Image (cartoon, rainbow, N blue to C red):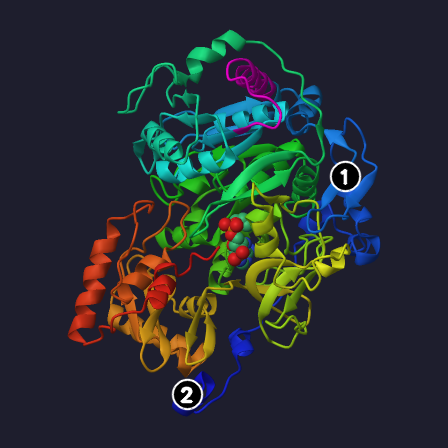
Amino acid sequence: MTSTETSAEHMGTTLSEAQIAVHWREEEYLYPPARFVAQANSADPDIYHRFSEDNFPECFRDYADLLDWDRYWHTTLDSSDPPFWKWFVGGRLNASYNCVDRHMKKTPNKAAIIWVPEPEGQLTEAITYRELYRRVNEMAALLRDFCGLQAGDRVTLHMPMVPELPVVMLACARLGVVHSEVFAGFSGTACGGRIADSGSRVLITMDSYYRDGKLLDHKVKADEALEAAGKEGAQVSKVLVFRRHPGEYRSANPMVEGRDFFVDEVIGRYAGQTVEPVSMPAEAPLFLMYTSGTTGRPKGAQHSTGGYLSYVAGTSKHYLDIHPDDTYWCFADIGWITGHSYIVYGPLALGTTTVVYEGAPAYPDAGRPWRIAERLGVNIFHTAPTTIRMLRKAGPDLPAKYDFRFKLMVTVGEPIEPEVWRWYHQVVGKGDAVVVDTWWMTETGGFLGATLPGVKPMKPGSCGPGALGIYPVIYDEEGKVIDPGSGRAGNICIRNPWPGIMQTIWGQPERFVQTYYAKYNQDRASKDWRDWPFLCGDGAVQALDGYYRILGRIDDVINVSGHRLGTKELESAVLTVPEVAEAAAVPVVDELRGRVVEMYISLKPGVTGPSEVEEKAKAAIETQIGKVARPRNVWVVPDMPKTRSGKIMRRVIASISNFADVGDISTLANPDVVEGIRHQVQSRKLQRNEVPRQLTQKELEEIRSYGTAE
Ligand code: WT7
């Protein structure tokens, strides 16, 4: 008996696997206000023609021309060695020059970076382009002369959200040194693996930083990192340690003589020095960004200088609508690709003012982001659904209490539920801001799918059409194109190369080809880029209007009796229940149905009566998706286990629901909630006699890595 027969028998209905997306309701369009359109960088629909396939790849000249080149390129795209594309070949430029020097000449006294420390009593720091120029030059001199670094060397950074981080990145770029920033919330061990993989001889870190009201000891991780890197045979000769409070060391771990140096002590030697920006070939790597692989060696996405910088500058201009006089705040961490592309490189390449905030979104309360926006006059705001949900949960009415006005707001990182989208638009955007849902990933350098804000209407829950010059396609498992408007979901790919695409996985070119191209490439010998669709790793569905709805990573599906239920659609359905603030769906192994769904929810403040909510959540799924998806249990928990970047750790709650070991929870932002949830859920399951049989190895692997797919 096949699984489809099983389900037909049990449910009295037959659905094909690919039908998962038909459960989504089509949402209404919302149009950008005329006031926005009148000032937008691009308001002429003809731009889509300029970026049409007929004009590929020359269309991307537009983006590259936003930069200053030391030498103009002769070949826009060299595709002779697929899938190792080369952009703007023959060109030479320096990223630090483009983000600093050229603006310093025109607007020396304009703020490049405004830094907001987490403690509200500490003063905000505005760093002008001239001051940024000084700091970057002095740091570059230190890296070159004190550390002996030169073009092509790699350096690992393990830095929190302080202005020293972009300064160090730009100082590396000035020398042609490849930086590899590891998110500060990652453990020392994770950092060590990345040091070893990249072959860095220098680690740059900080003694401590503020997060959620606490000064965290960060230097301790540097020692763990070096130990872990050492086990992999890596040799780190110098550790540069910034001090959060210069002159005061705030870590329990001692400095290691001859290896560790305080930057504030050494930098004085380089005061006032300038370093000539090294003119780099367009294809020289600018940085590595490791993606969180669950198994195996970490994957260092290698991004180029010319292609990458062009792409983030161009997309910042058209999609973030950044003008030089805007105050732009991207509320992400520079330790992620979002921060590299859309806090540092894109905005600074355009010479705007970019805000960097040190701490947690809701510290000391959920009004903090709105106070920052009000005080600094932020007019472009950029954050992730997880933060939006959290702010909506903790202070649904707070934005109205502050006097700020956003012209444009961005959401990025995961699909946003239409309910949450509407709160963002109406309450944070005060009904007046344009919302741009930007879909992309670490590997792609910049946006892949989004609405061009002055041209296309918004549709909650859909990212929009392909970005300019990006031609997506959705394939089924066999490589057949799925028609737009068919309501069928499949694997979304990008048919063409674009300047922001990663160059390779650092040191693992074969894995690069395997991971991103092998699935739909028919002929490895082909020299035609059309034979090399890039596999994004997301499931998606395209509506008749060409807009894409992203369903999440391909592996984030729960297969109930042969029905592939997207985690996101389940969660979106539950979020239509007014009391619910957050929802996470996980699979539970079931003898009869393969997997059943369990739902974890947290409630908005002041809401009581969980049993009623449980029933409402089940009913919402049943009506919006179908009986097949009805969760066996709905667990109302006080708080979800989350990573430091705010993603719900579905693997932890999935393990709890399946009585499996929760694994390593040391990287969670709130590891202390896990035990309480485990007790709550497992004691009820024991009472209800819902303990699953011993799981097989394969099942255990699925559960323990659920929601963490590469
Ligand atoms: C995955 C990539 C892009 C920078 C931050 C995350 C999901 C990202 C959206 C969006 C729906 C989205 C995808 C993608 N994702 N943006 N607007 N709508 N899903 O980078 O850690 O490399 O994660 O994030 O599943 O594959 P990342």
Q: Quadrant of the N terminus?
A: bottom left
Q: Above or below — where is 59 with respect to 108?
A: below
In depth, the one of 66 and 579 nearer the eye is 66
Q: Above or below — where is 288 with respect to 43?
A: above
Q: Is residue 137 magenta?
A: yes
Task: Locate residue 15, reporting x and y percent.
Answer: 51, 84
Residue 6, disc: 2
Residue at horizontal 40 percent and vertical 69 percent from the top: 574
Sequence-wise, the earlier of marks 1 and 2 is 2
Task: Locate residue 478, reporting x and y percent.
Answer: 62, 73
Ligand 1 is within 8 Å of the C-beta of the residue at disc 2: no
> Which quadrant would residue 111 be assigned to in this image?
top right
Q: Secondary structure at mark 2?
A: helix
The answer, for residue 405, to whether it is visible in the render is no
Residue 109, disc: none
Is the residue marked by circle 2 packed among few (<14), some (14-19), or many (20+) residues within 10 Å?
A: some
Task: Locate residue 265, reporting x and y percent.
Answer: 42, 11
Gap between marks 1 and 2, in whole Å? 55 Å
Q: Secondary structure at mark 1?
A: strand
Q: Is residue 76 magenta?
A: no
> Which quadrant would residue 72 be assigned to in this image?
top right
User: For the residue marked with disc 2, what is the amino acid?
Assistant: Thr
> Which quadrant would residue 255 be assigned to in this image?
top left
Disc 1 target residue: 88
Residue at horizontal 70 percent and vertical 55 percent from the top: 470
The answer, for residue 208, to whether it is visible in the render is yes
Q: Above or below — where is 66 with respect to 689?
A: above
Task: Locate residue 591, reporting x and y percent.
Answer: 31, 79
Q: Which residues are magenta?
A: 131-154
Is the residue marked by circle 1 packed among few (<14), some (14-19), or many (20+) residues within 10 Å?
A: many
User: For the residue marked with disc 1, what is the amino acid?
Assistant: Phe
Residue at horizontal 66 percent and vertical 35 percent from the top: 305
